[in-house]
Amino acid sequence: MAGRPRFVHIGMDGLNYPLLRKFVREGCLPTFAELIERGTINRLMPSIPAWTPTNWAAQITGAQPGTHGLGGWSKHNRAEPISVSGIKSWESREWEVETVWDVAEEAGLRSLITNFPVATWPSPVKDGYVLVPGFRDPPFVISNGQEYF
């Protein structure tokens, strides 16, 4: 696989972009400085509604909530009565657009998804890996990243 292009997406919910730049300039975050120097950093303007699931979904689909279909913390299946609970946002069922890992698979590339908070279980990738699905209340817990910082 040497010479093949690589893509790494590091997202941080609630990251303060001006503080990140300040700490990089001061030398406090050398790894981030190297990643920025070798790649790019972009500020993401929030989707409306500006909730965690809607914005993580927008990052990996390039679409707004009205298009990707995730408008909040859960999605109600229109075929079910209103009394039936909706599908939680961290489940991969009923997504309405392709993701960056769908595009990677179409190009013959593999994806590794770890601690991504929405739509990673059941695994949406056919030729790749989902390690530590980032949703709440998983059927199993390997490592809960929020507990270690």
Image (cartoon, helix red, strand yellow):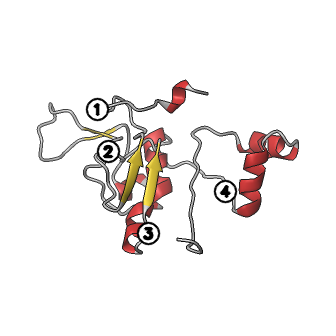
In the foreground, 37 or 56 = 37
Q: Is residue 149 left or right of residue 28?
A: left
CB under 8 Å between discs 1 and 2: yes
Which callout, 1 or 2, points at the residue further toward the start of the chain?
2
| Kind of residue indicated by mark 2 | Trp
Q: Which residue is mark 1?
A: 139
Q: Which residue is mark 2?
A: 121
The residue shown at (40%, 44%) is 118
In the foreground, 111 or 46 = 111
Total marks shown come to 4
Where residue 136 sits, quadrant-wise, is top left
> What's the distance in space between the residues labelled 1 and 3, CA to CA?
28 Å
The residue shown at (42%, 64%) is 110
> What's the distance in space between the residues labelled 4 and 2, CA to CA?
27 Å
Q: Which residue is mark 3?
A: 109
In this picture, is 8 found above or below 19? below
Which mark is in front, 3 or 4?
3
Badge 3 element: loop
The residue shown at (30%, 60%) is 126
The residue shown at (47%, 54%) is 58
> What's the distance in space between the residues labelled 3 and 2, CA to CA?
20 Å
Q: Is residue 147 left or right of residue 84?
A: right
Which mark is in front, 3 or 2?
3
> What's the distance in space between the residues labelled 3 and 4, CA to CA?
24 Å
Which callout, 4 or 2, points at the residue further toward the start of the chain?
4
